Structure formats: structure tokens, C-alpha cells
Amino acid sequence: MNKKDENASALGCMPMPAAFPYRAVFLQGKPKHEKYDAFWRKHPPMDTVRRAKIFAPFDALAGFGDCIAGKEIEYQEKRSLSEGEKEELDRRIAILRGLTINGKEARKNRPEITVRYFVPCRDPNSSAYGSGGTYESVSGICQKVDIVSRTIAVGDRVLAIDDIAGITSELFEHTDDAIP
């Protein structure tokens, strides 16, 4: 660990990612000039806050903000559904498939649902890459359930059935009594 990384951790900052493309430029620091030379007199040293304010609109370190923001996301492992949860999910998918068996039925029934699904981490610099992700929800009208490709179309998204953690809708509350 070099001195700048030690200082960063001492100040409570996150160390810079190893693959950061502007690492060498960042580690060079501010330009240095001889004290009282012509350049120094015309451009005296500037404090860090003022310097940052000047260069912030240009985003000279393009991508650095995204790298930092990516570290704030809390990833988790994909949760396996219990047998009971799998059966309930399959039952709800079967109901939706019946309501959207063809375009005409889908337009007539317009089943409104909310789907909670797993999104894998796509940041190759993250420790969760390939093993973790986040759970997100999407609400909308279920347009199609495709059993062959194992997908559900909700609004403008097509979700893999294997990534779905749950489906909720008022529709299922009414059909629980009708289906044994």
C-alpha cells in the first residue's frame, strides 16, 4: 500500500480501484513550481477546495463518480425459494398465463401485477460480481407469460421466471377462493 492509499484509509476514504483508468494522473497530485518564480507569482498555490470547485464541471476523472457510487450499493446473494414459495409462485404464474394466453385475452384481462426480481451485479470491479446482486420491483400490466422461454413480460420489461422472488396483485386475493 502506498502513502496516498494509507492517507486515504486514515481519513476514512475508500481506496482507489486498481483498474481506475486515471490512477496515474490522480496519484501525481497538483503541479509543483519553484517558489517565487514567474509562474508561482502569477498563479499562487490554490487550496484543494477551490481547486476542486474549478475542475468539477469538467469531470476530468470521467467514471470516477460512477465507481464511487457503485461501492455504495449493498449487494446480497440470491435467495433460494422454499418449496412452498415455489409452489405458490408457480400457481400465480399459471393464473397469469391463463389470463394472457393470447393477445386478445391479455388486452381484455389486463392483469396488473408487481414483480420482485433479482438483478445480478454487473460491475466487474465489485466483489459481488458474479455472486451477488440486488432485488428490484416492477409494477405494470402482465402482457405475456412464455413457459417455453421461461419469461414474463411486464410493461416494457421481460423478466426471467428463475429470477422472480414474488408476484403480488389484487387478482390473486380474489382467485385464492376460486381455485382449490
Image (tube, rainbow, N blue to C red):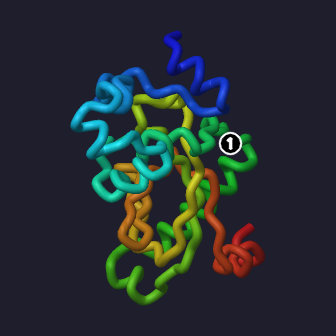
Q: Is residue 1 above or below residue 150?
A: above
User: Is 57 left, or right, of 11 in this rendering?
Assistant: left
Q: Amino acid at mark 1?
A: Leu
Residues 29 and 70: in front is 29
Crowd rating for badge 1 (residues with CA inside 10 Å; few <14, some 14–19, many 20+): few
Q: Residue at x 23, y 37 (%)?
A: 39
Q: Is residue 120 visible?
A: no
Which residue appears farthest toward the top when viewing the image?
A: 1
Q: Is residue 137 above or below residue 55?
A: below
Q: Is residue 165 visible?
A: yes
Which residue appears farthest toward the left when viewing the image?
A: 38
Q: Residue at x 74, y 73 (%)?
A: 176
Q: Is residue 66 above or below residue 5?
A: below
**On the image, which quarter does residue 133 sit in?**
top right
Image location of residue 150, percent across then percent down: 42, 50
Q: Residue at x 42, y 44 (%)?
A: 46
Q: Residue at x 46, y 73 (%)?
A: 142
Image location of residue 116, percent across then percent down: 59, 58
Image location of residue 102, percent across then percent down: 35, 75
Residue holding disc 1:
81
The residue tagged with tag 1: helix, strand or loop? loop
Image location of residue 148, percent across then percent down: 36, 50
Q: How many marks?
A: 1
Residues 98 and 75: in front is 75
User: Is 8 left, or right, of 155 in this rendering?
Assistant: right
